[in-house]
Amino acid sequence: MKLLIADDDGLIRDSLKIMLELVEGWTAQTASDGNTAYELCAADPPDVILMDIRMPEGDGVTATQKIKDTFPQVKIIMLTTYTDDAYIQAAIEAGAEGYLLKSTPADGIVERIRAVEKGAYVFDKGVKISAKKTPTPSFENLTERENEVLALVASGLSNNEIAAKLYLSQGTVRNIVSALLEKLELRDRTQLAVHYWKNG
């Protein structure tokens, strides 16, 4: 697998490169800013990019948007210390397939790179997809109740919390979530949330 690591912290950048190349046998290029990351993609698009958010000469969100516009096949995982809702929503809207914290253990990063490369979306357990957006999106092929539940899933609520908020049984909520996954052809709650914020 070909990787690109974009981070303005040289220690993090080089440590990740060494770990991923020596332990996994992957190849990894590095960039210290978003603009360089885009230039490297233009020269030789990688399979997956680990992208920091705050960097000089092109931040990670702007670089993600630009790369996704030009090279939509490239998968991008934000790797950062920030858990702010605004950053999370911006990353999702820019097209990122993942949002991990730099505190993620090395084996966890490797596992999530593999998952994203296979088409999954990955988000750190410490990250809640709870971005604010108005008006509430509505999807025509869903019922009013399904739209309500989808919005609450996208706000990070559990089935128990959704059941309490909508005065439904937990079983009913589970059934609605299952119906949403089937109708939207998605695999899990994280993908439901991503679908909501990207397409609403």
Image: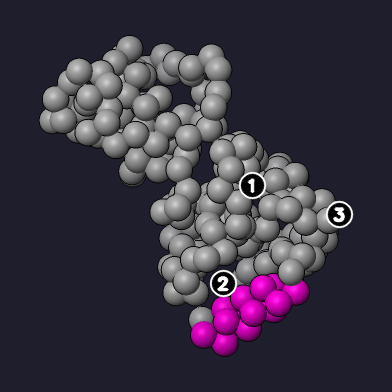
Q: Quadrant of residue 185?
A: top left
Above-or-below relation of 79 to 130: below
Q: Earlier in the sequence, mark 2 or mark 3?
A: 2
**Number of the label disc, if any, that sits on residue 57:** 3
Residue 103 is situated, as x and y percent measured from the top left of the image, at 52, 66
The residue wearing badge 1 is 72
The amino acid type found where label 2 is placed reads Met
The answer to which of 5 and 56 lies nearer the viewer is 56
Residue 44 is situated, as x and y percent measured from the top left of the image, at 74, 65
Magenta span: predominant SS is helix
Tag 3 near tag 1, CB within 8 Å? no
Magenta segment, which residues? 10-23
Q: Which residue is at 53% across, 14% downward? A: 135
Above-or-below relation of 16 to 73: below
Left or right: residue 32 compared with residue 194 = right
Q: Earlier in the sequence, mark 1 or mark 2?
A: 2
Residue 148 is situated, as x and y percent measured from the top left of the image, at 35, 19
Alpha-carbon distance for marks 3 and 1?
A: 22 Å
Alpha-carbon distance for marks 1 and 2?
A: 17 Å
